Image (spheres, rainbow, N blue to C red):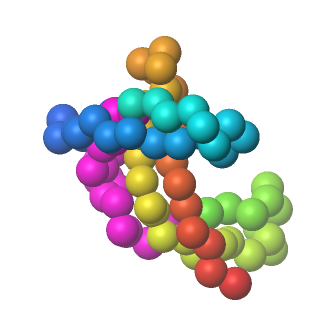
Amino acid sequence: MKSIFSSRRFNSAAFLCLQHDTKVMRKYYIGIKRNDEVIYVRDSVLLKSGPRRKDLPFVARVSGFWEEDDGKTLLRTLKTFS
């Protein structure tokens, strides 16, 4: 299951969590394509909570996708609902 970044991206400044004075530029994406499915920012997704069948999934909303400095790692911000 390989994820592919959306071709539409933009650069924006972000503050690092542990170092509030440090500002870095990140490449943000509006969505990713995974297999035949496209997931965009502000979409709701189901996340597995465990390997067993009776583990209930979490519902989350995608807040953002961005790329690490190495250019290979995709990160995302999710807001979960309880």
Answer whether residue 32 is magenta in the image: yes
Residue 75, image x, y percentages: 52, 40
Q: Residue furthest front?
A: 21
Residue in view at x 63 percent, y 43 percent: 20
Name the dominant secondary structure of the magenta segment. Answer: strand
- Which quarter of the image is occupied by the C terminus? bottom right
Residue in view at x 34 percent, y 33 percent: 27
From this view, report whether residue 52 is shown above or below residue 25: below
Q: Which residue lies furthest to the top in this view?
A: 70
Magenta span of residues: 26-46
Residue 82 shown left or right of residue 22 in the figure: right
Q: Which of 13 and 48 is in front in this view?
A: 13
From this view, report whether residue 82 is shown above or below residue 10: below
Q: Please count the marks in the image.
A: 0
Indicate the quadrant where residue 48 lies: bottom right
Residue 78 shown left or right of residue 64 in the figure: right
Residue 19, image x, y percentages: 68, 37
Q: Can residue 20 be seen in this view?
A: yes
Q: Can residue 33 be seen in this view?
A: no
Q: Which residue lies furthest to the bottom in this view?
A: 82
Residue 79, image x, y percentages: 57, 69
Indicate the quadrant where residue 4 lies: top left
Q: Nearer the viewer, residue 37 or 71?
A: 71
From this view, report whether residue 67 is shown above or below residue 29: above
From this view, report whether residue 55 is shown above or below residue 35: below
Residue in view at x 41 percent, y 46 percent: 65
Q: Which of 14 and 74 is in front in this view?
A: 14
Answer whether residue 68 is magenta in the image: no
